[in-house]
Amino acid sequence: LILFYSDNGTGKEITSRLGDKLVKGGKSLTTDAGTHVPCIANWKGTTPGGKVLDDLIDSTDFLPTIAEAAGAKAWTNDGRSFLPQL
């Protein structure tokens, strides 16, 4: 299982260009500019290619997900497994 993700957006003082659109940074905000970052999962024989989900996940969800994938129980109350989406 390979998981690639980014942190929550760019700094508020940064403006990026997305095509012809300007996007103001939103790090630490609960707007799209602060939460809309990539998460790419690849698990050969398990994850279907080309599937795109709009689910909101958090870095605290990774430990429960990896633990469940390994058949173990996570020892944290933080986060929720997103294994079913994979």
Image: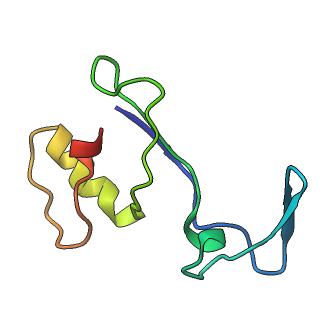
Please give left or right for residue 6 compared with residue 81 in the image.
right
Q: Position of residue 6 (x, y in %)?
A: 58, 55
Q: Position of residue 35 (x, y in %)?
A: 55, 68
The answer to which quarter of the image holds residue 69 is: top left
Residue at the spot x=58%, y=67% of the render?
8
Q: Position of residue 70 (x, y in %)?
A: 16, 38
Residue at the spot x=59%, y=77% of the render?
31
Relative to 1, say whether 45 is above or below: above
Please give left or right for residue 25 compared with residue 2 in the image.
right
The answer to which quarter of the image holds residue 51 is: top left
Relative to 75, say whether 14 is above or below: below
Name the colour scheme. rainbow
**Residue 12 vs residue 21, the one in the foreground:** 21
Q: Residue furthest front?
A: 20
Residue at the spot x=26%, y=67% of the render?
79
Residue at the spot x=24%, y=72% of the render?
78
Q: Position of residue 60 (x, y in %)?
A: 34, 65
